[in-house]
Image (tube, grey):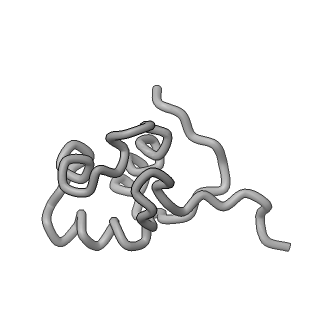
């Protein structure tokens, strides 16, 4: 059975992490640049820890609640 929780996008900007990861890698964006270029992580901020982990690990679907340190 698949996990019940699947977080895969920035709600504010309606952008899938799977869409954002290739853009970040192609352009060499860090989190600040990704936020500036797409607006993701820059409004409510709830996706910021997911974006940070996405950039670190390449994951685009998360099965746990992440928070900022």
Q: How many marks?
A: 0
Residue 17 horizontal/vertical position (percent):
43, 64
Question: Which image quadrant is residue 14 in?
Answer: bottom left
| Frontmost residue, 35 versus 12 | 12
Residue 32 horizontal/vertical position (percent):
21, 43
Question: Which image quadrant is residue 19 in?
Answer: bottom left
Residue lying farthest right?
A: 1
What residue is rendered at 26% in x and 48% in y?
A: 35
Q: Quadrant of the N terminus?
A: bottom right
Left or right, 7 with respect to 26, comes to right
Residue lying farthest left?
A: 27
Relative to residue 17, is residue 56 depicted above or below? Answer: above
Left or right, 23 with respect to 58, comes to left
Residue 30 horizontal/vertical position (percent):
21, 50
Left or right, 5 with respect to 45, comes to right
| Frontmost residue, 57 versus 65 | 65
What residue is rendered at 45% in x and 67% in y?
A: 16
């Amino acid at each position: 059975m698949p996990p019940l929780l699947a977080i895969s996008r920035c709600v504010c900007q309606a952008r899938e992490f799977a869409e954002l990861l290739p853009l970040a890698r192609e352009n060499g964006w860090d989190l600040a640049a990704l936020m500036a270029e797409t607006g993701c992580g820059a409004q409510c901020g709830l996706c910021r820890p997911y974006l940070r982990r996405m950039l670190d690990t390449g994951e685009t679907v998360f099965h746990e609640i992440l928070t900022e340190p």
